[in-house]
Amino acid sequence: MKTIQKLSLLVLALITISACSNDDDATPQTNQETTLNIVETAQANAELILLVEAVIQTGLTDALSASGERTVFAPNNTAFTAFLNTNGFDSLAEVPNDILTQVLLNHVITDNNITSSVLIGNRGYVNTLATGPNDTNLSLYYNGMNGVMLNGASTVTTANIETTNGIVHVVDAVIGLPTIATFATSNPDLSSLVAALQLADTGTPTVPYIETVSNSQTGPFTVFAPTNDAFTALLE
């Protein structure tokens, strides 16, 4: 009986030790925080080589490395290659720095870390660091109803890359500087306005309306844009 009692105590001790060991293994491990800023994160991503080259060429390295909170929509290499081909450039070096700088700033939103959870299921406008007429900041239209699309042309392919000074979302197209036509055609609430402009242009006006609001060299204009509901009410 004494032997059995001793064996029972030994088994109980082993079970207790094993349980304590298992509890230690189950302790949640603290996730290692990222130590890379936005520029360093891009440098570490082979998909963003051309973006890094553009940032260096325009002298924006320090601005994008500085502390703070910002959201960057980062065009991948394929996006920059398409941008160069579409605009007749053989390399980034051929793009005038003032233009390239504004294009890059059009991908940056400051003082705000915008994660995909904010974008998905929502539509709206935010201001970028790019500037337009009267030095006002240009807007960016996001549509998160089917993935996340920006200004009707650029789609987020990789979201929520965390850095020490913001959030990076990789996109598949360079987001060009917008015109009035950009926002009219990318916002589904303004499809009736676009249809009205197209109908008006069939009357062969001296200067087609759509061509006018699509040309970044014309203006500046202020447009009060009736929504689809407004046009429906007008027709009724």
Image (cartoon, grey):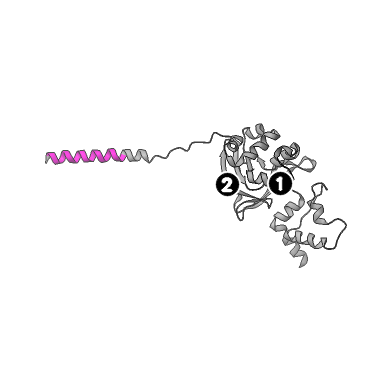
Which region is colored magenta? 2-19
Residue at the spot 81% in from the left edge and 54% down from the top edge: 211
132 relative to 16 in the view: left or right = right
35 relative to 234 in the view: left or right = left
Would you identify the image quadrant in which residue 110 lies?
top right
Is-magenta flag for residue 97? no
The image quadrant where one finds the C terminus is bottom right
Q: Is residue 164 above or below residue 233?
A: above
Would you identify the image quadrant in which residue 102 lies?
top right
Is disc 2 placed on a helix, strand or loop?
A: strand
Dot 1: few (<14), some (14–19), or many (≥20) neighbours within 10 Å? few
The amino acid sitting under disc 1 is Asn
Can residue 170 be spotted in the picture?
A: yes
Q: Which residue is mark 2?
A: 158
Can residue 75 be spotted in the picture?
A: no
The amino acid sitting under disc 2 is Thr
- Which disc number belongs to residue 85? 1
Residue at the spot 58% in from the left edge and 46% down from the top edge: 159
Q: Main secondary structure of the magenta part?
A: helix
